[in-house]
Image: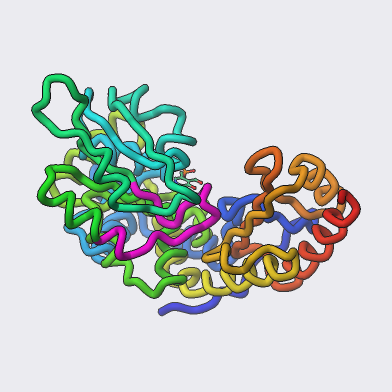
Amino acid sequence: MYGIDTDRPTDAAGAVDLRSDTLTRPTAGMRRAMAEAEVGDDVYREDPTVNALEERVAELFGHEAALFVPSGTMGNQIGLRLVCEPGQEVLGDADCHVLTYEMGAAAALFGLSSRTVVSPGGRLSADQFIAQVRPHGDWHLTPTAAIAVENTHNRGGGLVQPLAELQELFQWSRGAGVNVHLDGARVFNAHVASGVPLSTYGRLADTASVCLSKGLGAPAGSVLVANADRIAAGRLWRKRLGGGMRQVGVLAAAMQYALDHHLERLAEDHEHARLLAERLGVDPETVETNMVVVQGVPAPAVAAAAKAQGVLVGQVSADRIRLVTHLDVDRAGIDRAAKVITEVLRDLR
Ligand SMILES: Cc1ncc(COP(=O)(O)O)c(C=O)c1O
């Protein structure tokens, strides 16, 4: 079932694009699967390809049910709303995607309050979160209803969260009446890097949003998993948000294809990231999955100079660039990027 798909397109402009793993374009095989997808109206729940995908992903993550959503942001925000009522609080780390990059959606759309703890490098510490949780039933305090966890951690440079911390937090949360939401946009990378089963990661969260449009290479599409009651409620939230789509089996087919062909190959992206780190003098210990962060460099100047030579890099801050390996960058692209960035850094120093 799993296999490496070598049928990938080359960038028309010949650029090596390391800005993000969201930049992958559907391969020829994926496009064929999309063209041949059996479809129906998913708002009527009559799209067989979506229904099969939801069943598959629910099972993979050890949950009762699942809901196709068009984006990771929608999956996260519906997930949070399902475990947090208006006026209650979501606790997350200061760099987490749900509170950093999702446009204040939890507050703007749902009236959820949020608070952050600073976790160095995005690394989860269960004790740190537990110490900050505020109880229900106190007339002075905003109660903490949910804790948001991100695995792998984007601003943490693709860090894989320690399993023991995830377990401690989840076990504690059972007795505390607090829910855990997993932003699993890159949980597939975490799984491939750590060998921890997807079902283990899934069962350590009450709601989890997982993306097929990042390293797995689908053009769009995420899946929210939870228990059946929550997913039924999530379906209504998806409709309210305008995320109820019709013959969306064409996307679900790409997502199925991604699971069949692009999951195991994430190991290749991780290997490429380690290789890039070595070549650029970045500590390989800081590279756990498909991201390399180069610190202490003039990011805008590096990005501009590299771009002039056909290598695109991400700018995380004024002094940090990020390189993300993915399906559309092969070994030759990695070699070329390493050479160009090494020269750019040397010239700018
Ligand atoms: C960690 C993380 N969570 C969620 C998202 C949101 O996904 P989307 O862009 O599909 O809304 C992203 C996007 O890059 C992400 O990196």
- Residue 310 located left or right of residue 324: right
Rendered location of residue 211, percent (x, y): 42, 53
Q: Which quadrant would the N terminus be assigned to in this image? A: bottom left
The residue located at (24%, 40%) in the rendering is: 146
Is residue 82 rendered magenta in the image?
Answer: no
Q: Chief secondary structure of the magenta span?
A: loop
Rendered location of residue 151, percent (x, y): 40, 55
The residue located at (46%, 49%) in the rendering is: 122
Q: Visible in this render: residue 89?
A: yes
Rendered location of residue 128, percent (x, y): 32, 47
In the figure, residue 70 lies in which quadrant? top left
Eyeballing the image, is 139 above or below 65?
above
Eyeballing the image, is 193 above or below 136?
below
What segment carries the magenta color? Answer: 149-167
> Which residue is the extreme one toward the right?
347
In the figure, residue 285 lies in which quadrant? bottom right
Q: How is the image coloured?
A: rainbow
Is residue 166 rendered magenta in the image?
Answer: yes
Eyeballing the image, is 7 above or below 216?
below
Rendered location of residue 202, percent (x, y): 27, 60
Q: Visible in this render: residue 40?
A: no
The residue located at (21%, 50%) in the rendering is: 206
